[in-house]
Image: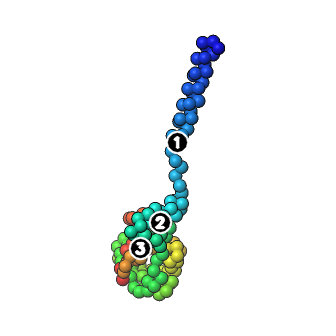
Amino acid sequence: MTFKTAALSIVSLASVSLLVACSQRTQPVQQPVAQQQVQQPAQQNTNTANAGSNQNQAAPVQNQPVAQPTNIDGTYTGQDDGDRITLVVTGTTGTWTELESDGDQKVKQVTFDAANQRMIIGDDVKIYTVNGNQIIVDDMDRDPSDQIVLTK
């Protein structure tokens, strides 16, 4: 074997070794959120002292609507850009009354979809959440400046 051939063989071997070493250092692929959630309860229950109390607790799933109470019947009031809002809820329907500062009054029918946290006010689809004695109404883009808080 000549010097050139030996040098070329050594350089080739070094290149292959470097490629193998670099390929083994790749980052692990991130699991989708759903798979991470499934594995979390098993990781949380590794402590045998607390295993009995934690076995049936599942981790909450992110980006999924939180189930809203189904009995939100009542009268809620609040303000929206100077207008006085009154929401009267009975079951999954209700009325939305806007009393404007100039005395004009608009009444719209409301329908609730608790499973999807949606409410339809007239022709407008909104997102709502229930927090104790409050209903918080958001636009679909959840812009905080458009949020309306109604209190029972």
CB contact under 8 Å: marks 2 and 3: no
User: Which residue lies at the image location 48% right of the left edge and 64% below the top edge?
Assistant: 42
Q: Position of residue 108 (x, y in %)?
A: 48, 80
Please give the residue where the numbered disc 1 appears in the rendered image. Answer: 26
* Other-residue count near label 3 (Cα within 10 Å), few / some / many at <14 / 14–19 / ≥20: few
* Other-residue count near label 1 (Cα within 10 Å), few / some / many at <14 / 14–19 / ≥20: few
Task: For marks 3 and 1, give the CA distance.
Answer: 38 Å
Q: Is 41 rendered above or below residue 71?
A: above
User: Which residue lies at the image location 58% right of the left edge and 17% below the top edge?
Assistant: 7
Q: Quadrant of the N terminus?
A: top right
**Mark number, residue 53:** 3
**Front label number (1 vs 2):** 2
User: Which residue lies at the image location 49% right of the left edge and 86% below the top edge?
Assistant: 91
Q: Position of residue 72 (x, y in %)?
A: 44, 83
> In the structure shown, which secondary structural element does the residue marked by tag 3 occupy?
helix
- Lower position in the chain sequence, tag 3 or tag 1: 1
